Structure formats: structure tokens, C-alpha cells
Image (cartoon, grey):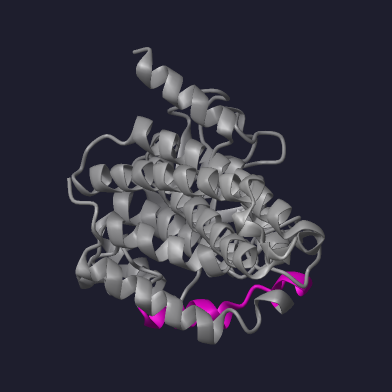
Amino acid sequence: MDFNLTENQRMIADMVRDFGKKNIKPKMREWDETQEFPIEVFKQLGELGLMGVLVPTEYGGSGFGYLEYVTAIAELAKIDGSIGLSMAAHNSLCTGHILQFANEEQKKSYLPKLATAEWIGAWGLTEPNTGSDAGNMRTVAVQDSDHWVINGAKNFITHGKSGNVAVVIVRTGDVGDSHGMTAFIIEKGTEGFSAGRKEDKLGMRASETTELIFQDCRVHKDQVIGNVGEGFIQAMKVLDGGRISIAALSLGIAQGAFEVALAYSQERHQFNKPISSLQGISFKLADMATEIEAASLLTYQAADMKNRGLDVNRESAMAKLYASEVSVRAANEAVQIFGGYGFTKDYPAEKYYRDAKLCTIGEGTSEIQKLVIARAILK
């Protein structure tokens, strides 16, 4: 096993750090305060090839694998979790679903626009009353000749308002039937398709989160991804890869929190010496560093397995579970090390603290990850 970064990973890490220093850090506090989704930043990320990391070059993407993808997300998240989250959602969910399951005509139509960020993508599974219980979704599509008529709503949708296209999973069969749901590609501007309320969030505030509303929305049958009834099965496979991206997001936030806490502990003096020399602080840093290293190993193991085409259901859940919990602990300890300053917005620790919590919730809560892992080991 080779744990060294590849040349591509080092190149991507350097590129993201340079980009973030120039284009994200100067305005990220303002975006956080106003909850502005900085779409121009994602257009620039598209020019760098980071909005189509996994998309083959024949469709306008970068043609990289999951190791490069994890590196890119983690480096973005070290700077701003919101930007890392939106980049991950665009790549893993909307673009990833089309890449994995769409037909050739659909891929040629949508992937070049998504991979370059000419279009921003959204993905809709969650509903107001069916979070983890996706099988009981109430958004329904009824066939009418060559079209499907969709009614219902989705919530907690990243890029629900600003997205140009969404992949949406809706019910076309019986409630609770895992083969009773279908995935559709729906473009912005389609009659009966609109964005609803934008969420006012604790963290990840520059990553847009809204409702999607369907009122007699007519979608042509050519917009079905795969076969009717395969949507839920597709979604679960998409989420296997998506969990790796959230593990990477968590890893980046944890690393960012650790780095600012480490630097502060060496600069801040109490009792005529840096607080890093105090055992109470140095042990916190030791725990943070060890847990981050373990989270990194789990995340890159899952990424390597995904690259090799192996089943990552268990490994991606383990990586997501552990890395997200580590992210919360690391951010919490960073605030503690900063002391009173950690509770103010003049210092970076509080933002890592607010952003980290979503990682234990989005794309499957920690409890759902444990369920996935338990089912895998008890087969």
C-alpha cells in the first residue's frame, strides 16, 4: 500500500490552495453572513476542471478518479466547508447519477454542461416527511401517454434554486416498494417545476439549500434515467459514492480546524509560555491529529476501492461515519483551544464548528451509516 500522494493529487491540492487563497478566503465570511451562493466561484471551479472531476474527457470532464476527487474536496473544505459541500453535491449526486445510469444520448446532452459548470446540478431524494425513510416518499409521477405528470415536493436540496437541471427520484409504484421509484432529469424552466423556500441554516450557509416543488409538472419519457422502477436502486448506489465525498468533506473540515487550532496554540501565550506546551492542550492536539489520520485512511481506502470497481457499501459508510464524527470532535476541540475567542466570529474556529455538524446528517445520518455497516457485517 502506497500512502503517498500521486503527482495528480499534489497538483490538485496546490491548485485548490492557490485558488482558495485568491477567490474564496477574501469573501467567505461575507457569503456566510448573507447566505449567498457564490455561483461565479463554481463557474471558475468548472474552468479548473473541478466540477467534472470524475467525468471522462470525452464528455468534457477531467477524467480523474476518486483519489483526486477526495483530495479536491478535502482541500476546498479546509478553506470553506460550504464550497466543498456544493462542489461535492454537484459532482457526486446530479452529475454522478447521470454518469452512472443515464443512456448515451442523455450523457452527451448533460455531462458536458455539468462538467464545465456551464450548468449547476441538483439532486432530489429527501422529502419533508421522509428523510431516512425514502421508501415512503409522497412525490408521485403518473404516466400520461409519452409524458409523466409529477406532483409533490422535495426538501433540503442543494442548488434547488440556482441549479439548471435536477435529477429527481419520485414514486411511480406502490409506497414502500423499492422498485416503485423512478429517476427523472428535469431542466429548470420546465412548466410546473419551481424552487420553494430557501433554508436558513446553522452552517454551510454559502451552499444553497431549498425546496423543489412539482405542480402538474410534465416530463417526457425520454427524461427517465434507466428503466421505470429503478430510481431507488440507482439512488442507493449513487449514495455509496456520495458518502465518500462527505467523508472527504468531513476530513477537510477536521484538518482545517486542527491547523488553525495548532497555529493558535503556538502563538497564544499564558503563564509566560505558549499554550501548546500545556499538557491539557497538547493532548487535545494529539487526539485530533490521530483521529484525523485514521479518518484519512478510511476515506482513501474507500476511494481506492471505488476506483477499482469494488463494492464500497460498507467501506464508504464506515468512512463517512467516522470522518464526520471526527470532524465534529475536531471542530469542538478547536473552539475549546481558542477559548473565548473561539466563540467569536473574529476567529475561524466557530465556522468550522458550525459547518462540521452537517457532515453527520447529510447523505445519511450517522445512525443510518451504522445501520448500513451492521447489515453488511451481519450478512
Q: Which residue lies furthest to the bottom in this view?
A: 22
Q: Is residue 92 left or right of residue 139?
A: left
- Residue 131 location in percent, x, y? 64, 36
Between residue 150 and residue 156, name the one nearer to us. Answer: 156
Residue drawn at x 44%, y 76% is: 17
Q: Do we see residue 94 in this rendering? A: yes
Between residue 325 and residue 23, name the one nearer to us. Answer: 325
- Residue 154 location in percent, x, y? 65, 47
Q: Is 255 covered by the magenta stretch? A: no
- Residue 206 location in percent, x, y? 66, 68
- Residue 379 location in percent, x, y? 34, 13
Q: In which quarter of the image is residue 218?
A: bottom right
Give the number of callouts: 0
Q: Is residue 223 left or right of residue 141?
A: left
Q: Is residue 369 left or right of residue 228?
A: right
Q: Give the range drawn in magenta.
A: 31-48
Residue drawn at x 77%, y 57% is: 339
Q: Residue furthest top?
A: 378
Residue drawn at x 24%, y 42% is: 305
- Location of the N terminus (image quadrant): top left
Vertical placement of residue 241 versus 33, above or below:
above
Q: In which quarter of the image is residue 355?
A: bottom right
Vertical placement of residue 302 versus 173, above or below:
below
Q: In this view, does 125 lie to the left or right of 228?
A: right
Magenta highlight: main SS: helix
Between residue 366 and residue 300, name the one nearer to us. Answer: 300
Q: Do we see residue 156 in this rendering? A: no
Residue drawn at x 48%, y 52% is: 251
